[in-house]
Image (tube, rainbow, N blue to C red):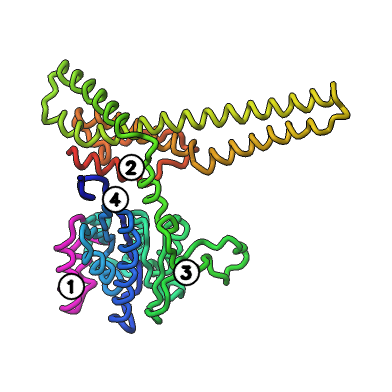
């Protein structure tokens, strides 16, 4: 039997924004630990998927480090550091020895780091520093899926403050979980953009507060979509293994004809073929269902119109024939609702996009071109279509990393 680590894994990216100076640091740290533990238990309920935790933080004093410490206590966790300046310049922010030592300790334990090289000069002006703080805060939001905000709900005191970052996260559609630094024992709140706020109501907050969600789908729809993909029972093991075997055979034959070394071929067979076959087969499956539902809608609609004309022309006094028209219209609504509720069209497009991306990657990797970080990104296709979702991007990036 396969263990969780041998099967499917999902990278859950947790960002942080918050105040540096906190009245009761121990209480806030405890509140952060409780929230992270809650999230861990919530995602751990799915035994088929291994969650890999990534804390994304600039490692400023206070909330940034608290969240980093808490995430790193979890198994399968790592720390990604985003810095507003070159490292030596950023170190100037940490005057006290304890502050500097804590930063250095966390920084050394980070697996990934990203240094903004746009500003490397010494003695950066305060206004420029604030702009860089805002930029790195926005980058944290862009890189994360869930943002933990240790925020008192006050406006930012200067450019790049916590209020500015939360506002950007609201506009970016991130899941925002707020801890009240003035009352850390208070329940954590979910912040969502306010739907009833008028543009002229500037004094009204741009968000509404809700209780901490008890369901994964409210916190991470990307995780839900990923779980649906890897656990979809529409694709049987027999069909999957047969299709994977045929695809592998075709690829091996092509590799033999071109004298492709096994060092190129084997990673593709191990890491790209399985998700490609799954995406390709599921895309075809949901395409058939969507097309069938679309045809049913047209057939029911035509039948309803036919029954109306038939009844009016030949049996105008037999009103009971209208029931056939009503049944046909009910069939139209049922087909439409089932198709939408089960997301047949959405899954068809998403899985087809994933399959074609993986198919392309098989060739670009052989050409020694990194499809994720290459210098020549592919042109935007179907710009009116707001996909793919980030779970697709990260699944592709993970498989490419495994191959390389």
The residue under label 4 is: 49
Q: For the residues carrying marks 3 and 2, which lies nearer the camera in this image?
A: 2
Q: Residue at x 20, y 49 (%)?
A: 3
Residue designated by label 3: 211
User: Disc 1 versus disc 4: distance between alpha carbons?
Assistant: 33 Å
Q: Secondary structure at mark 2?
A: helix
Q: Which quarter of the rendering shows the N terminus? A: top left
Question: Is residue 308 covered in magenta?
Answer: no
Residue at the disc numbered 1: 102
Whether 85 is among the magenta residues is: yes
Instruction: Check residue 230 in the rendering and tell me which mark sits there, or answer none.
Output: 2
The residue shown at (28%, 74%) is 62
Q: Which residues are magenta?
A: 84-112
Q: Is residue 60 above or below residue 386?
A: below
Between the C-alphas of marks 2 and 4, the distance is: 9 Å
Q: Residue at x 68, y 32 (%)?
A: 328
Query: Could you tell which of marks 2 and 1 lies nearer the N-terminus?
Result: 1
């Amino acid at each position: 039997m396969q263990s969780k680590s041998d099967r499917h894994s999902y990278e859950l990216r947790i960002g942080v924004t918050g105040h540096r100076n906190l009245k009761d640091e121990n209480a806030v740290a405890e509140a952060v630990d409780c929230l992270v533990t809650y999230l861990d238990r919530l995602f751990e309920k799915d035994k088929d998927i291994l969650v890999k935790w990534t804390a994304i933080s600039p490692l400023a004093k206070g909330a940034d480090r608290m969240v980093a410490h808490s995430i790193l206590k979890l198994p399968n966790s790592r720390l990604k550091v985003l810095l507003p300046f070159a490292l030596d310049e950023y170190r100037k922010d940490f005057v006290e020895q304890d502050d500097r030592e804590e930063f250095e300790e966390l920084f050394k334990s980070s697996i990934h780091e990203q240094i903004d090289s746009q500003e490397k000069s010494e003695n950066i002006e305060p206004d420029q520093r604030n702009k860089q703080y805002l930029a790195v805060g926005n980058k944290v939001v862009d890189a994360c899926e869930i943002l933990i905000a240790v925020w008192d709900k006050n406006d930012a005191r200067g450019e790049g403050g916590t209020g500015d970052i939360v506002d950007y996260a609201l506009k970016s559609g991130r899941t925002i979980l707020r801890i009240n630094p003035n009352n850390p024992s208070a329940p954590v709140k979910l912040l969502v953009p306010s739907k009833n706020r008028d543009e002229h109501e500037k004094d009204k907050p741009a968000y509404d507060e809700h209780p901490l969600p008890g369901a994964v789908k409210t916190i991470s729809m990307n995780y839900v979509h990923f779980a649906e993909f890897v656990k979809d029972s529409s694709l049987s093991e027999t069909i999957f293994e047969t299709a994977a075997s045929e695809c592998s055979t075709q690829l091996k034959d092509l590799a033999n004809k071109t004298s492709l070394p096994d060092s190129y071929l084997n990673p593709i067979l191990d890491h790209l073929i399985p998700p490609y076959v799954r995406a390709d087969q599921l895309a075809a499956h949901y395409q058939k269902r969507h097309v069938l539902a679309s045809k049913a809608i047209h057939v029911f609609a035509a039948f309803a119109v036919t029954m109306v004309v038939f009844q009016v022309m030949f049996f105008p006094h037999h009103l009971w024939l209208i029931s056939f028209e009503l049944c046909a219209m009910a069939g139209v609504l049922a087909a439409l609702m089932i198709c939408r509720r089960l997301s047949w069209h959405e899954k068809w497009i998403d899985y087809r996009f994933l399959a074609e991306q993986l198919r392309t990657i098989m060739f670009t990797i052989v050409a020694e071109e990194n499809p994720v970080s290459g210098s020549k990104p592919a042109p935007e296709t179907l710009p009116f279509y707001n996909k793919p979702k980030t779970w697709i991007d990260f699944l592709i990036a993970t498989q490419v990393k495994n191959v390389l």
